[in-house]
């Protein structure tokens, strides 16, 4: 039975738990939270908000361009959906494979820094392809490259 939980050094990551055996003798167990938190992997449920972010970007860009919200703006925004699924899925895949905080930060930074290039790729690809193909190819390519570069930079920071 768990009797008490106290922090070893204030708000440090080390927690000592006092347990009582069935004979009433106290037993101390030690848990290192940094080790537990370092092993946590992001849930695949994060793919939902990441994916939905990109159609909102598409609708916002179209609204800003035409100064109104129309069905056309919503359909053009949905062209960003495959890019969000593929780019966000790749981001989560790499984050789940990463063990260190430095590599996670570098991976997320690579994704975020690639975002403007993905948006520009989507906007300029409309000159060559239909919106859904252009968004999927050029937008996703920028996100994959940025995320991968961030992941490899994080790997070099670990060494």
Image (cartoon, rainbow, N blue to C red):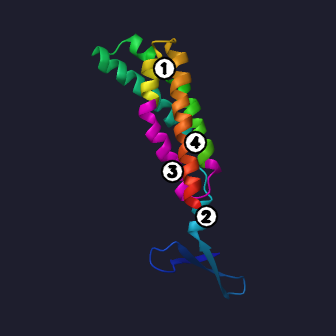
Magenta-tinted stretch: 96-117
How many residues crowd around disc 2 within 10 Å: few (fewer than 14), some, or many (20 or more)? few
Nearest to N terminus: mark 1 or mark 2: 2
User: What residue is drawn where x is 52% and y is 34%?
Assistant: 143
- Residue 10 in view (yes/no): yes
Q: 59 left or right of 23?
A: left
Question: Majority secondary structure of the magenta segment?
Answer: helix
Badge 1 is on which residue?
78
Residue 11 location (% of width, % of height): 45, 73
Binning the other alpha carbons within 10 Å of mark 4 as few (below 14), some (14 to 19) or many (20 upward) gives many
Alpha-carbon distance for marks 2 and 4? 26 Å
Number of the label disc, if any, that sits on residue 32: none
- Residue drawn at (36%, 12%) of the image: 70
Q: Tag 4, which secondary structure?
A: helix
Q: Is residue 157 above or below residue 134?
A: below
Distance, label 3 to label 4, CA atoms, is 10 Å
| Left or right placement of residue 53 versus residue 44 in this view | left
User: Looking at the image, which residue sits at the far right?
Assistant: 22
- Dot 3 or dot 4: first in sequence order is 3
Between circles 2 and 4, the one closer to the viewer is 4
Question: Callout 3: helix, strand or loop?
Answer: helix
Q: Residue furthest left?
A: 67
Q: Quadrant of residue 30?
A: bottom right
> Badge 3 is on which residue?
106
**CA–CA distance in space, label 2 to label 3:** 21 Å
Residue pointed to by mark 4: 148
In front: label 2 or label 3: 3
């Amino acid at each position: 039975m768990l009797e008490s939980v106290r922090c070893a050094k204030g708000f440090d990551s080390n927690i000592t738990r006092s347990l009582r055996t069935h004979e009433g003798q106290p037993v101390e167990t030690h848990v290192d939270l940094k080790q537990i938190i370092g092993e946590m992997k992001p849930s695949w449920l994060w793919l939902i908000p990441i994916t939905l972010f990109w159609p909102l970007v598409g609708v916002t860009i179209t609204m800003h361009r035409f100064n109104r919200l129309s069905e056309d703006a919503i359909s053009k925004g949905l062209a960003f959906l495959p890019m969000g699924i593929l780019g966000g899925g790749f981001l989560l895949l790499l984050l789940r494979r990463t063990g260190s905080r430095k590599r996670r930060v570098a991976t997320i930074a690579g994704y975020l820094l690639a975002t403007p290039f993905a948006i520009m790729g989507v906007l300029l690809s409309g000159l060559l392809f239909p919106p859904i193909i252009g968004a999927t190819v050029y937008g996703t390519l920028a996100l994959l490259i940025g995320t991968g570069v961030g992941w490899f930079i994080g790997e070099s920071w670990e060494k």
